[in-house]
Amino acid sequence: MQRIVREQAKKFAFDWRDEPLLKVSPGETFEMETWDASVGYFKTPEDKAIPGKRPGFDRHPPLVNPIAGPVYVEGAQRGDAVAITIESITVEPYSWVAVGPKRGPLGESTRFPDCSTEYTTKIFKHTPGPSGTTRDGTLHFNDKISWPITPFIGTIGVAPDREVTTTLDGQGEWGGNLDIRDVAPGNTILLPVWHPGGLLYLGDVHASQGDTEFTGTAAETQSTVRLKVELLPKKRIPWMRIRKPDSIVSVYAFRPLEVAVETATIQLIEWLVEEYGFSAVDAYCLVSTCPDFRINVYQMCKLAKLNYVAGAEIPTKYLVG
């Protein structure tokens, strides 16, 4: 099986000029190893998020969120789409979260000075599950609180059309740093293609995260991602889409949040009309009346120039047109 190893996974931009590290055929399974968002800096609670001590923070923007890639998908051309199925994510033995001055919405808080005057790093131990791996393991928040490891890819995308975009705040129809908890094993991510081969990158895996990534970091970890990519010729989609086993999700990112929500919903309506035989009126009314229609606020943290990320989701049991 082809693989990108961790030492190769230190790109900090989605750049169409990069030489591919792998070339894969549609349907071929391959693996990509990833760093955590800090490239291994946080190992103990004593490793604080002090900018002057962090490697790469002498650059503007800082070198964070390293990604692996690009992967060249044979046959992919501009105007196509790729369907990326995440088969598994195996995370390493720990993850971390870091808070402190000027980090996140409480980074300047006077009400909660512990969050704004001191740098705090929490290290979470991962223990294997019944499989003997962390794929079904447990994250230990502390001695009393734990939950199942629920990993996902925080930063994923193909090379944008013309620009070169950083892994810190790059977002667009091509993907980017979106922190969508549904970019997870068992789901398929659809992205439009702008360059020959698509040029797929990914990184910034989280062992778990709730909605919004409120502090600006989640349970950041290193990982091995197993995936495959199918080609959808001459299929132009407006933005990232997600196919889950029991639902579909239309994604959009913007500020203010209400624009992201409205646009994601309109693009879901478009998807229902184009692929599932709905009339525009029926699709419009469905998203307003169906009790299982959901708006997911995936990312809404105060970090750099990041837009807010929303997903409009409808179960597939209703897609009968």
Image: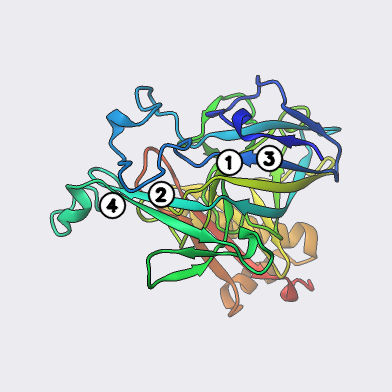
| Amino acid type shown at disc 4 | Pro
Observer-nearest of 319 and 197 = 197
Image x and y of residue 147, in percent? 49, 69
Observer-nearest of 39 and 157 = 39
Q: Which mark sits nearer the N-terminus, 4 or 2? A: 4
Residue 5 shows up from this direction: yes
| Amino acid type shown at disc 3 | Met
Q: Quadrant of the N terminus?
A: top right
Image x and y of residue 256, in percent? 40, 51
Query: Left or right of 147: which side holds 113?
Result: left
Relative to residue 235, is residue 291 depicted above or below? below
Of the numbered discs in the image, which one, if any, rests on residue 105? 4
- Marks 4/1: CA–CA distance: 24 Å
Q: Mark 2: which secondary structure? A: loop
Q: Are marks 3 and 2 in contact (CB under 8 Å)?
A: no
Q: Nearer the viewer, mark 3 or mark 4?
A: 3
Q: Mark 4: which secondary structure? A: loop
Q: Mark 1: which secondary structure? A: strand
Is the residue marked by circle 3 packed among few (<14), some (14-19), or many (20+) residues within 10 Å? Answer: many
Q: Residue at x 38, y 73 (%)?
A: 144
Q: Nearer the viewer, mark 4 or mark 1?
A: 1
